[in-house]
Image (tube, rainbow, N blue to C red):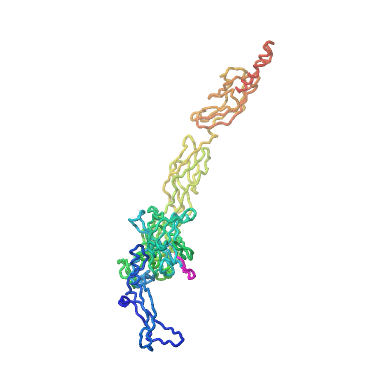
Amino acid sequence: YMNDVDSAAVSFDIPRDVTVAANAVTTFDVTMTVDPTKLPVWTLENPFSQDDLAARSPSLTMAEFDGALVFDDTSTADTDRDLHIVYHALPKAGAELAFSYEEVNGIGELVVTNVGATTILPTAESVVATSEENRDADFDILLTTFAAYASETCESGVFITSSIQLRDEITHMRQIGVRMNLDIDNDGVYDHFMMNINDVGRDAAIPGRSRTLIGEIDAAGEDVWQWGTPMYHAAGEDTVTFSGCSNLLGLDANMLGSTINIAASVGYPNYQAGVFSETDSAVGSTVFTGNPVVTLESTEDAETKLSELAPGQKAVIRADGNFTLTSATGTDVYTNSVTGVPAVPAVPNLVAAEFTINETALDGITIGRLSFEDTPALRITNFTVVSMSAPGLMVDAETGDIMVENTSMLDFESDVKEIILTVKATDLLGTESAAADIKVTITNDADELPVVAKGQNFSIIESAAEGTVIGLLDHSLFESAATMVTGGTVANTNLISINNKGELVVTGSLSYYATPTMTLDVTIMDDSGLESEVVQVMLNVTADPKSHAPVIEGGQKFRTDENVAIGTVLGQLLFSDPDMDISPITRFIVSGTTLVSVQLDGSIVTMGEIDYEFDKKIVFSVQAEDSKGYVSKAVSVEIDVNNLRANDDDDNSGSLAWLTLLVAPFAFMRRRKQK
């Protein structure tokens, strides 16, 4: 066709003549050369509408280069077209990107180059999963991606695409079945799916069309078909892309930032939808969020940002994490940072340097800078402190400067004589160096006083003898020349002192009632002659119960007649109270009987009827308790009961004998209850 000839996109190298012997076969080479820069724009893509379908035939005509090789047998004079061999070709200008490490403005950079034959406008998407090439598998998956875009036409406000890149190119979607299962809530159960659905049959709406079929996976694991949305594929490409509003997959805008698990599978197709026989699969996860931020910078001017790359053009890549570069139409995955980047040069080892700094160095002072044994091939983006043996220093993440962060932590007397920083460096691709130890020696500036800890509390019983150790003061020696405490002072009392161990010692007579709590102003001194600042500590003087409890004399006995009136004083209990003026007795505790009580003055008073026939002797225990709660030891007291009648059981009247017999048991019960 003349349009093919006029394009000058193809040319042939054909032998001038070919000789074929009788009954023989001859082979010969014909070379077809394609200039991709002169090819027409490729428009053979998956049709979505009748208009798209109508455009496919003209698109095919424009894309196809066909004709014939014509042979003229010179032995035949009447014809000049004795044999022709028809050829058909669908050449397409390749779009391809490649990564490399190159020196840009004196720095090793990751560079992307358009090695194809057409201008590329790359879009960044998230990498979900990568899969090693398997030459034995048909429809082998290399990569899956995910992308999210703001959309006013979607109910959720988010439009998503997800692509599968195959090892081989496919001509059309009837060749393959593709599917993705999605676990949108990260619970380990796939709950939604996307797969191809083809318009099939004589009544197909758009013959040749493939769409994204979206639906749910029910509890039984069955597919529930719900939505049909566009699917993107261009004839001869290796990429198939699903698409749809995120809400169709159960993803609302409020779920942004959540993890999605995606299992992709490909294989021989079903007649209408999905995979009939799986040949490969890839499983991965991604975050439901905006696409990775990838910037292309001009290799000539870093301030110039590029949105497209012409054939042969290069750009420096700036990215915070893994990404893939795809076509804006979703029909081609160009390359990705996971498998597309060549072997990353190792970050050279950091020099294990040593530095020195005085403990009084000010915050922000630079001690030194991290350096490498060799020059890094790529730009170092971050220096990290893996660990630090003591606080106080820092490493500037960008410059590698070692600096004082908190000078108060650089305390020689706190045994911080050196700090070991374990550090590593990371280049722009995230490659880390081996960890290196940096030693910073701290030099001394002798000026540290001993310190007595604040808020200390001690207790001592009031009866403690002189020389009794109350307790060791919590203290710290910070001066490097000091090895021990030599003594101390207690400024506001002569009852307590500090010995050469830093212990509080009783040196006088203590009294709970006179000074139950003492606030002591104390200092300690170390053997370098430095004295601490005055610190207040609390000393609680506890009462000795033996010194304050009332005392009841033991072995006390009393005697009373039976049948004395209630309230009769039977005797006076002998007792003493050492603190009667401070804590008088508030009660006597009687146990063992209810027939008597003891009044505050020690009077033993009857509380019930005393009957010799039932109680010949009353024995009870008594304790005294004062107003401070001190209780005396329990003492046993006896009261002997006198029998006033020789025979309480003599009869006065025979006629009343039966009444006496009846009343006696009740009287017995009454008296027993009064005890």
**Residue 293: in magenta span:** no
What's the magenta bit mostly, secondary-structure-wise? loop
Q: Quadrant of the C terminus?
A: top right
Q: Residue at x 43, y 83 (%)?
A: 27
Q: Residue at x 44, y 46 (%)?
A: 454
Q: Residue at x 60, y 17 (%)?
A: 564
Range of magenta residues? 129-138
Quadrant of the rendered image containing residue 76: bottom left
Residue 473 seen anywhere in this rendered image of the structure: yes
> Looking at the picture, does residue 450 appear above or below residue 161?
above
List the single residue furthest toward the front.
78
Q: Pick whichever, 165 or 257, lies toward us.
A: 165
Residue 368 seen anywhere in this rendered image of the structure: no
Q: Pick whichever, 572 or 673, lies toward us.
A: 673
Figure disc tally: 0
Query: Where's residue 671, x and y in %?
Result: 62, 20
**Residue 132: in magenta span:** yes
Q: Quadrant of the N terminus?
A: bottom left
Q: Pick whichever, 654 or 557, lies toward us.
A: 654
Q: Pick whichever, 327 or 47, lies toward us.
A: 47
Query: Where's residue 657, x and y in %?
Result: 68, 13
Query: Where's residue 129, x and y in %?
Result: 44, 63
Query: Where's residue 120, x and y in %?
Result: 34, 68
